[in-house]
Image: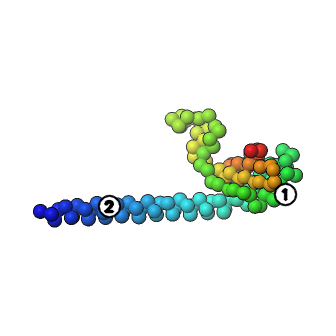
Amino acid sequence: MQSPRYMRALVVTAALLALLKVGYQEYLFRVSARDVIVATYQERAVSHCQKQARSQGIAGILSNWSKPSSVSLVIGKGGIDVQFWEINNAMWNARYRNPYLHIVADEKSSAIYCEYDILNGSAVVQRL
């Protein structure tokens, strides 16, 4: 009568291992996709950020945008006032779907933050 107990334990263990495998593969895919997107668009984003900083008169503060202190990929722009259920809103994609590169460039005492919209090819530069 102990045979079903061992079989149940074996099935549960196999199911857990399968879940771990699928989860780890998903994690690797997401990390790889993020790294590829950042590597692909970072140069273009830095160029747009430099242009935007020059137009705002803060270009002299930063001399080296090519080595930012951090670059991260973010999906959606948190500052847009659109609720999740308002799917017919024109700004819904910008709030919840569009990819953005956030670039923080530090130099001495000033910190400059740039948000590059990958789909629209536009940048917004602000001080932190």
Which residue reaches farthest front? 109
Asked whether residue 47 appears in the rendered view, the answer is: no
Verify CB contact (< 8 Å) between mark 1 and mark 2: no
Residue tagged 1:
63
Along the line of sight, the residue nearer the viewer: 6 or 35: 6
The quarter in which the N terminus is drawn is: bottom left
Q: Amino acid at mark 2?
A: Ala
Tell me: 103 left or right of 7: right
- Element assignment for label 1: loop
**Which percent across, then down, holds residue 64?**
81, 59
Q: Amino acid at mark 1?
A: Ser
Among numbered discs 1 and 2, the one appearing first in the sequence: 2
Tell me: 123 left or right of 32: right
Along the line of sight, the residue nearer the viewer: 108 or 29: 108
Residue tagged 2:
15
Tell me what residue is drawn at x 72 percent, y 52 percent. 104
Q: CA distance from mark 1 to mark 2?
A: 54 Å
Q: Residues within 10 Å of mark 2 (few under 14, many from 20)?
A: few
Tell me what residue is drawn at x 64 percent, y 37 percent. 80
